[in-house]
Amino acid sequence: MQQTICALATGAGGAVAIVRLSGPQACSLLCQLTRRSAAPEPRKQTLCTIYDGADPLDRCLVTYFQAPHSFTGEDVVEFALHASPYVKGRLLELLCAHGATPAKRGEFSQRAFLNGKMDLVEAQGLCDLIASGNKAAHKLAMDSLDGKLSNRVEEIKKRLSELLAQIEVRLDDVDEEMTPLSDEFIRQEITAVLEHIKALADTFSVGKYIKDGLKTAIVGAPNSGKSSLLNALVGFDRAIVSDQSGTTRDTVEETLEINGQKIILTDTAGIRDHALDPAEKEGMRRSHRAMETADLILFVLDASRPLTPEEQALWQDIRRQNKRTVIVWNKTDLPSARPSLEHEEAYARAEVSCKTGAGFDALKKLLTADLTEAKTADGLMISNLRHYEALLRAQTELESALIRLQAQAGGEIYAEHLRGALRYLQDLIGEVTPDDVLGIIFSKFCMGK
Amino acid sequence: MFVCEEHYDVIVIGGGHAGCEAALAAAKLGAKTLLLTQSLDTVAQMSCNPSIGGIAKGQIVREIDALGGAMGRVTDHAALHYHMLNTGKGPAVHSPRVQCDKKVYQFTFKHFLELQPNLDIMQDEAVKISVSDRAVNGVLTLRNTFYHAKAVVLTTGTFLAGTIHIGTAMFRGGRYNDMPSDGLAKNLREDLHLHMMRFKTGTPMRINARGLDYSKFRLQPSDNPLQPISHFTDGTAQSKRTFLSCYITRTTLETDKILRANFQRSAMYSGHIHGLGPRYCPSVEDKIKKFPDVTSHPLFLEPEGFHTEEFYIQGFSTSMPEDVQRALIKSVPGMEKASITRPGYAIEYDFSDPRDLYASLESKLIPGLFMAGQINGTTGYEEAGGQGLMAGINAALKTQGKEPFVLRRDEAYIGVLIDDLINKGVNEPYRMFTSRAEYRILLRNDNADLRLTPHAFKLGLLDEKYKAPFEKYRALCQKLTQHPNAPVDENETELFPWTVQKARTHADIYQKYAGYYERNKKDAERLAEMDSIKIPEGFDPSAVRGLLFESAQKLAAVKPLTLGQAGRIPGVTPADLQLLAVHIERFRRLKNAKAAR
């Protein structure tokens, strides 16, 4: 039985987003989410309301393509939604919650090819696409080897594998010598792991940023134009703007919506090494904090003059935050002395003039680049729907294990759920095979014949 | 050279637990079969402990039995003590274990072989497997006799270039008192170029029970009521027989002290042994070294037979010198006055990399050559028997031009065993555990017949007389799982050897695991779907562009036959599989286009 896969078919921006669903369950998923009793007429756009529980999520145009007359050759449903990141993200979540899985890179095309909908020439492009996904995933795994995320998942997996080993070794205990594990111990371990997984899942951008808004810290040296940038984005003089450096003593917060994306901008005090008075020091302390709690950092630089040592130091500080960062070269209306910043090519960049408004469209696009694909996330941020989905499924497995524990169902049942959870965590990083668990067993327990 | 005028379909080399099952199975399928063994007096010998079954192993015996193999029936015949393990846990891990009279076991098995039509047995040692046109065509023996064969099943146990160690003493042997197979070892390495490696295993000392102080032991009586290990044994009649007890004692601090003082004299630690041993079932010196915090280890005293005072001491496997072994015995409560009859020893032997095998257990390197048991890197009578049965079946099927018979991971422990071997390879002697089976809930000892007996009937491995009662039993199980309170004729006699009670038990277990059954089945379906995508002949998966380097290497080493098998090779990623799927389809279409032209 083929799985039903879903993914966003359109890029960031635009007024309409398309979510595509393909596979044997496509039709029933459509009916469930739109509360229809039957599929709409094939190949005709139909206006439907998508429900998120009791509440409507969006009114959208739905097209149903009946197998084999579709792109993939399977039953396909396309939702043309309002392009709010929240609506897009939530629909994908709902589809997955009802049994679909997020598509792998190139998977729609793969199915099209396997179902005879694509010729051999086209298939070459498809292979390149899948191969690039392979490399990207591999690179991600390699890159994040010392990253906080993989470490955290590794810790979770380790603790879970150890518990599984403790349970398994008793199931395979030939000598019938081992003292049974107490239910309380198993409960504590599962609960602890569950907390970690929940905490991680909660960082998912769809859940966090899109609902609560993207926290954006504007940082930079005094007088580089941070407040002007905020004002230009917001559209009125919210922050105090003056030519005397160090005017912004407090952090200033402003909520705005760009392309349907809620963004919370924080203007911070200019960071300077030699703060002149205590109030300014307090402002800088807050700036640092704002940077630490931000999801996105806008680093504002004056393109008309060379970099100061303070700016160089601040740049190192920002890079250490390991967060999604956009470098904003301001004052491009003035004669350019555009210096270069170490490793700047690895970051998103925009050149703007707060005075003339030049470059702001490009900057806004950068700010709202599809957040579900945010790549330079903080080590503890889940930014990929597939990863998020894996965490949720692992969570469900562990919750089931707790319920079964309540009923004292037995080690072989808890093991089923723990293995299930471990399997989903594999989607995030690395691999746990039963042999890994046996490895733990052999290293910790003396097994008889 | 004498060339035997008979042309055999299948020749089985080795008469151990793998070889005996292989020979019986091949002959039952109608293949003209010859079993070659060094010594007919040691056919089906229990070289190590006197028990059959155990955790996960008991399930394998039930599977062999359900498929028409002999191990279960011989075990019930030779049984001297029954014990169902793990009864305090869920039914998925209940595992039967049966102590046997070693002599009764081996002679019963020999008798089975003698009675089997289509099967010849001959005492001689194979020294060369003859290959022509890259396929097996016969076997040459030590007596310089040549036998023609279409297929050969190799089951060499610990005999290939076997070396025995007791302390620092070292001598050649395939088992204590038996010659190693050096000619064949050389032939496999140098002429056939198989990828041979070394493993190590060991056995504990045997003692004379005279002088044992039983008051210091914990008694383990035989189960009453008992459950026969074979589906075809009459439980009522079986329980009327006489059974013996086993005893449990423990090592002491004194044992610990003796071992520590003599580490350097153990063959394991003196640097004489290069083969890798198992991490489970370690020698007692291994246990002290690896688990220094455990001050006492359990020892099980198992009778070697009805007509002997010899006991096997499970848990005391060692390769210490004889004087240390004597001291060890005296350090154990109840055994102070016992004497050793045979010292424990370690043995090193050749095995061949199982990744060179297809799932049928046929070699990828030499068509017509099948392998089973320790030569594939496993340990245990049961693991050997399971492989032997499958190799025998597949060797016969091959000579008849039929498709191989392969068990899936969700069908049998035997399927898990072979799938693990051929895809993952081994880095220590492979022993089955229930935790190796991801479909543990489905693979139970109580339902081995429901899972596998239909295959046995289809292949012709089981007596037709069981067909009608089995179908009745199966229908009854189905009825009771759907309607637990459905009316049933309690006195139904045409079910024998199955019973109404057994069907009820099955239905109860099904209820307990209901949700998990469905879940496992669903997973298994996905697996089967991937396995249905065959990797076409001439398609080299490792040459596919865009695969990760490590994956390409592993695919080149294993040469999987299906997409599913490729996915079970450790390290192969989902994206690798996606790529393979596309390339397989591309390959197929290009080939079809060429054919059309």
Image: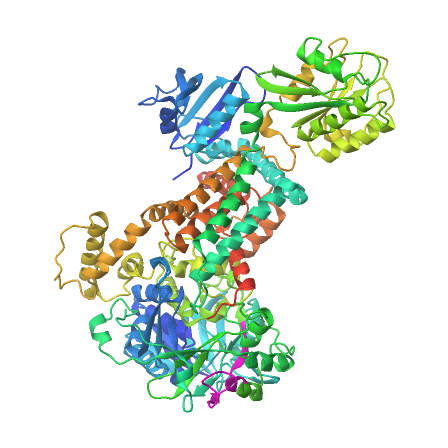
Q: In the picture, residue B254 is in which quadrant?
A: bottom right
Q: In the picture, residue B190 is in which quadrant?
A: bottom right
Instruction: Using the rendered image of the protein, determine whether residue B557 is visible from the camera's viewpoint.
Output: yes
Q: Residue B591: x and y, percent?
A: 48, 42
Q: In the picture, residue B471 is in which quadrant?
A: bottom left
With respect to residue A256, does A5 lie above or below?
A: below
Q: Is residue B89 left or right of residue B500?
A: right
Q: Is residue B366 left or right of residue A232?
A: left
Is A138 in front, or is A68?
A: A138
Is A346 in front, or is B386?
A: A346
Q: Residue B473: x and y, percent?
A: 20, 58
- Stretch in magenta: B328-350
Question: Residue at horizontal 24%, vertical 68%?
Answer: B232
Question: Is residue B579 magenta-colored?
Answer: no
Q: What colouring method underlies this structural image?
A: rainbow
Q: Residue B427: x and y, percent?
A: 56, 64
Instruction: Using the rendered image of the protein, determine whether residue B535 is visible from the camera's viewpoint.
Output: no
Q: Is residue A63 left or right of residue A228?
A: left
How many numbered callouts?
A: 0
Q: Is residue B113 left or right of residue A365?
A: left
